[in-house]
Image: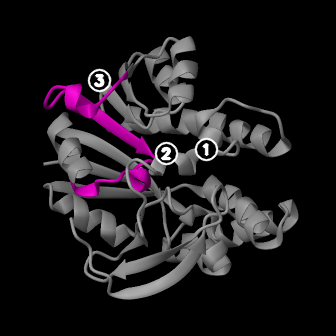
Amino acid sequence: MNFSKDKLVLKVKDHSVSGEVFELWLDEQYEILVTHPQPSLEKLPSYYESEDYISHTDGRRTLFEKLYHFIKGIALKKKLNLINSLSTKGSILDIGAGTGEFLLTCKNDGWHVTGIEPSERAKQIAHQKGIGMEESLANLADHSFDVITMWHVLEHVPNLEQQLKELKRLLKPNGVLLVAVPNYKSYDAKVYQEYWAAYDVPIHLWHFSKNAISKLFALQSMKLVQVLPMKFDSFYVALLSEKYKNGKMNFFKAFFTGLRSNWFGNRNKEYSSHTYVLKNE
């Protein structure tokens, strides 16, 4: 899928690893921002080599990590309740499964679970919990899952068009897809601009709006049926954004920015992150 470079929106620094600067270009048809240049498949893994990449660890060394995992525990229960409200218990695939905590929660609730995770470190931690991971989506049979989840993963996928086709192939008819991604139209994105942590270049290759999700999945005959706010994300993202902008985490300021973001989100329905519920047609 070739997106147009209609408008240069921002230049954003990689604050985590390289210090390199990347451009965000808007495709006006799909309302998606695209990171340019995009690293090669060979170089891309090097941009993940940061001790601060929490989703690949179970670390609780700092107050920030402890807070992250506390909120994550609450979010796991909410995610389980959500999938149980959308589908009868069956087979679930989590793409970008990290250390396997979500799949373990689902397994303990009676779901048949499958995970995909590229990080060897994360896979080892998941294996210790009794959660095995498949090597590739290509190994999985057509129409084999009632539910597929991608929690803050779609923005990382190099070949977006191929990924969307694979999701279509793997979902059962009337199956449910849950996609959680940051929203560049949120209040906190506007406040922090190039320091907004959820841009996370270059490992975030794509930056979605609600219309982008709806239009892209419509190409695969998948219908957007619900958009849900992820209200915790505004606080987490604001805290990291404060660090990128001012060199330190200002908990007080981040908390109030997060509150304001959710207040504006309640009015205009543009939250820091959304979970999109899509139905296979």
Q: Nearer the viewer, residue 198 or 200?
A: 200
Q: CA distance from mark 1 to mark 3?
A: 32 Å
Give the mark, 1 or 3, whose residue is nearer the N terminus.
1
**Circle 1 or circle 3, nearest the eye:** 1
Give whichever of discs 3 and 2 has the lower sequence position: 2
Which region is colored magenta?
A: 134-161
Q: Please, what is the three-letter code of the amino acid marked with disc 3?
A: Ser
Above-or-below relation of 129 to 151: above
Check disc 3 and report the residue beneath it: 91
Q: Where does the image place residue 148, in percent across and percent down from the top left?
A: 32, 37
Disc 3 versus disc 2: distance between alpha carbons? 30 Å
Residue 227 versus residue 256 in the image, above or below:
above
Which residue corresponds to the image point at 49% horizontal and 38% vertical from the top-left? 79
Q: From this viewpoint, is residue 73 visible?
A: yes
**Dot 3: what SS?**
strand
Per the model, the C-alpha gap separating discs 1 and 2 is 7 Å
Contact check, label 1 and label 2, Cβ < 8 Å:
yes
Quadrant containing the N terminus is: bottom left
Residue beneath the point at 23% across and 68% down: 215
151 left or right, relative to 192: left
Q: Which residue is mark 2?
A: 45
Image mark for residue 49? 1
**Is 203 positioned to the left or the right of 3 in the image?**
right
Percent coordinates x, y for residue 46 in the rendering: 54, 47
Residue visible at 72% across and 37% down in the picture: 70
Extreme residue in the front direction: 42
Indicate the amino acid at tag 1. Answer: Glu
Which residue is drawn at the image coordinates 66% and 45% (left, top)? 50
Q: Are the residues at dot 1 and dot 3 in contact (C-beta closer than 8 Å)?
A: no
In the picture, the disc for residue 175 is none
